[in-house]
Image (cartoon, helix red, strand yellow):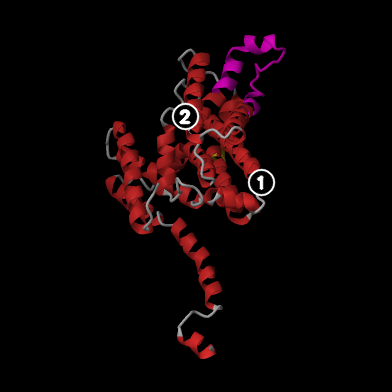
């Protein structure tokens, strides 16, 4: 009997752990799949215009992408759980918009007995609005079991209309220093927004890759029923993820407002397409359970490098949306070819 078993050529039990140990290394390599493309774009950019690799231009790329990159981080957290939050682009505009509205029109807050004239409450109000939006999304999606795509699509429209209403369709100017600081100040010669972006991604990499909470997000995105059976508090984690994503979107909107020194009524309009483009080409699965923050960061970096090269080459900005859509389609096709799995 033992001779028969040996003659079948079945792998020894000790071979399986070795195969499992190889998987993390392969996963880390997949996180860096866009690095060659980034190098190619850098070479092309330098050939198009020698200014491309100068420090000022590189800092400009990182600063211009910092707000959208944090928005990509927020969406990636939601996508990993198998959900989708379309309302983040509207939170990106509404959260700082509400804070600016209260500061610009102090008669509103005076009637409530609150003084926001110095703008000191601008930042916490912005983050609070983001948290409330995320909590409301969680209430509808988690508590009442409504479809996340439809809920956040509806919220996108509602929040966009609310920002247009409170702003009267115009732009908020005269932001207090506290609201413009994150988008305009510099530390050690580097804009604060870049520091915040890098720190946010570093923290997200650690949380998703090395903590039980991060593993729980992947488990929920892979199979929510199995995660629930394993003792993971799926509802609580989903709710917390939606709140965290909305707070990050509010922070990103604050950074954008500080960089522009204003908040237009259309801030964030259409940003969700750019966010999904960056996430998809970075390897984040729309079906949940797959993706990394390193991949998401390289995705948004590649997009902004391409846009910068096109700008230096004199290509009109109107082609940017075409580019983002084309990149998404190409990324999906490549993912299908290399992954060998149909996408639903």
First to last magenta residue range: 97-125
Q: Where does residue 294 sit, x and y in percent of width and height?
A: 49, 52
> Which label sits on residue 319?
none
Judging depth in this view, the residue of 144 and 310 nearest the camera is 144
- Circle 2 residue: 153
Q: Is residue 202 left or right of residue 161?
A: right
Q: Where does residue 270 sit, x and y in percent of width and height?
A: 41, 30
First reached walking from the N terminus: tag 1 or tag 2: 2
Can the viewer see residue 39 in this picture? yes
Does 100 lie within the magenta span?
yes
Name the residue located 30 percent from the left edge and 40 percent from the top edge: 310
- Circle 1 residue: 233
Determine crowd level at label 1: few under 14, some 14-19, many 20+ residues with C-alpha closer than 10 A.
few
Judging depth in this view, the residue of 187 and 77 nearest the camera is 77
As drawn, the residue found furthest toward the right would be 113
Q: Is residue 272 left or right of residue 309?
A: right
Kind of element beneath mark 1: loop
Placement of 311 over or under 136, stated as above or below: below
Q: Where does residue 88 sit, x and y in percent of width and height?
A: 51, 32
Determine crowd level at label 2: few under 14, some 14-19, many 20+ residues with C-alpha closer than 10 A.
some
């Amino acid at each position: 009997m033992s001779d028969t078993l040996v003659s079948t050529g079945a792998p020894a039990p000790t071979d399986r752990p070795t195969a499992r140990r190889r998987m993390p290394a392969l996963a880390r390599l997949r996180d860096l799949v866009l690095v060659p493309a980034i190098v190619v774009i850098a070479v092309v950019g330098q050939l198009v215009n020698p200014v491309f690799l100068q420090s000022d231009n590189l800092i400009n790329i990182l600063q211009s992408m910092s707000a959208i990159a944090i928005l990509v981080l927020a969406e990636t957290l939601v996508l990993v759980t198998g959900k989708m939050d379309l309302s983040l682009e509207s939170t990106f505009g509404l959260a700082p918009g509400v804070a600016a509205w209260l500061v610009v029109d102090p008669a509103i807050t005076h009637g409530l007995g609150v003084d926001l004239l110095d703008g000191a409450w601008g930042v916490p109000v912005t983050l609070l609005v983001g948290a409330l939006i995320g909590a409301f999304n969680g209430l509808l999606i988690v508590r009442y079991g409504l479809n996340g795509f439809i809920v956040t699509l509806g919220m996108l429209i509602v929040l966009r209309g609310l920002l247009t209403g409170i702003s009267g369709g115009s732009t908020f100017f005269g932001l207090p220093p506290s609201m413009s600081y994150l988008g305009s100040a510099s530390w050690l010669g580097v804009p604060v927004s870049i520091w915040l972006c890098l720190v946010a991604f570093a923290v997200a990499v650690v949380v998703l890759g090395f903590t039980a909470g991060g593993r729980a997000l992947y488990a929920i995105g892979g199979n929510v029923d199995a995660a629930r059976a394993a003792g993971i508090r799926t509802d609580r984690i989903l709710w917390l993820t939606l709140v965290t994503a909305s707070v990050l979107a509010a922070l990103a909107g604050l950074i954008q407002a500080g960089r522009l020194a204003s908040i237009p009524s259309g801030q964030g309009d259409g940003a969700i397409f750019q966010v999904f483009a960056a996430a998809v080409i970075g390897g984040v699965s729309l079906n949940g359970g797959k993706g990394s923050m390193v991949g998401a960061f390289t995705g948004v970096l590649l997009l902004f490098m391409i846009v910068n090269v096109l700008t230096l080459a004199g290509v009109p900005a109107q082609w940017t949306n075409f580019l983002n859509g084309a990149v998404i389609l190409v990324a999906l096709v490549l993912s299908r070819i290399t992954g060998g799995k149909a996408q639903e």
